[in-house]
C-alpha cells in the first residue's frame, strides 16, 4: 500500500507478506488426490465395462446351454431306443420315458438294478459281461439277451453300455442303450 506525505507525495510502501506455503501444499495434495481419484474412476469404469461384457457372455452361454439341454432332453425322450443311466453299483438313476414301451414298467417301478430287466436265464451271463466292463472301465457293444416284460412276454434285446466320465475322466456310472 502506498503511504503519502501530507502534500501527497509518495513517502513509502507498506507491504503485507503472508506465507501461503501450507495453502499451496494443500492445493498440490488436492490436485494429486483428484488425479488419483480420476484414475481410480477410470479403472472402475473399465472394470464395470468388463463385468458388463462378462455378464452378457454369461447370459448368452446360459441361453445356449438351455437350448442344448432342451435339444438333448428331446433327443433322449423321443429316441427309438431305451436309455438307462446307472451309478457304479448298477443302480438305475435314470430311465427314459419310453422304457414303458419296451418293458411295460414305469421308470419308477424298476427294482433299482439294471440287471432286473434281464431274463433270469440270461442274467448270469449278462452280469459276467457287465462286471468285466465295470472292472476294466470299458464299454460293451451288442450285448444280446432276453428280457421279460411286466406282463410276462419275453422280448430280445441288444444293448450297448458306455462309461459316463466326469471332467477328470473318472467313471461316474454307465449309459445303457437298448
Image (spheres, helix red, strand yellow):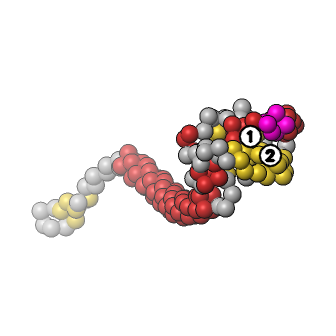
Residue in front for this viewpoint, 121 or 80: 121
Q: Residues within 10 Å of mark 2 (few under 14, many from 20)?
A: some
Residue that appears at 63% across and 35% down: 112
> Nearer the N terminus, badge 1 or badge 2?
1
Residue under numbered circle 1: 119
Residue that appears at 27% across and 52% down: 16
Residue 86 position, x and y percent, is 68, 40
Residue 125 position, x and y percent, is 85, 37
Quadrant containing the N terminus is bottom left
Q: Residue furthest left?
A: 6
Residue under numbered circle 2: 145
- In the image, the segment drawn in magenta is 121-126
- Disc 1 element: loop
Residue in front for this viewpoint, 1 or 10: 1
Q: Is the C-beta separation of discs 1 and 2 under 8 Å? A: yes
Q: Is residue 178 above or below residue 168?
A: below
Residue in front for this viewpoint, 32 or 109: 109
Residue 145 position, x and y percent, is 80, 46
Most frequent secondary structure within the magenta stretch: helix
Residue in front for this viewpoint, 36 or 90: 90
Residue that appears at 75% across and 35% down: 120
Q: Is residue 37 above or below residue 125?
A: below
Q: Is residue 53 left or right of residue 8?
A: right
Amino acid at each position: 500500500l502506498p503511504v503519502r506525505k501530507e502534500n501527497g507525495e509518495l513517502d513509502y510502501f507498506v507491504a503485507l507478506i503472508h506465507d501461503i506455503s501450507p495453502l499451496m501444499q494443500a492445493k498440490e495434495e488436492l490436485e494429486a488426490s483428484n488425479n488419483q481419484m480420476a484414475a481410480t474412476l477410470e479403472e472402475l469404469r473399465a472394470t464395470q465395462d468388463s463385468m458388463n461384457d462378462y455378464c452378457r457372455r454369461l447370459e448368452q452361454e446360459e441361453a445356449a446351454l438351455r437350448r442344448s439341454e432342451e435339444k438333448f432332453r428331446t433327443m433322449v425322450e423321443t429316441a427309438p431306443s431305451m436309455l438307462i443311466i446307472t451309478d457304479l453299483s448298477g443302480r438305475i438313476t435314470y430311465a427314459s420315458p419310453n422304457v414303458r414301451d419296451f418293458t411295460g414298467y414305469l421308470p419308477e417301478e424298476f427294482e433299482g438294478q439294471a440287471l432286473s430287466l434281464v431274463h433270469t436265464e440270461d442274467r448270469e451271463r449278462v452280469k459276467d459281461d457287465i462286471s468285466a466292463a465295470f472292472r476294466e472301465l470299458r464299454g460293451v457293444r451288442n450285448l444280446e439277451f432276453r428280457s421279460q416284460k411286466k406282463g410276462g412276454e419275453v422280448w430280445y434285446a441288444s444293448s450297448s453300455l458306455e462309461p459316463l466320465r466326469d471332467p477328470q475322466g473318472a467313471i461316474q456310472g454307465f449309459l445303457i442303450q437298448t
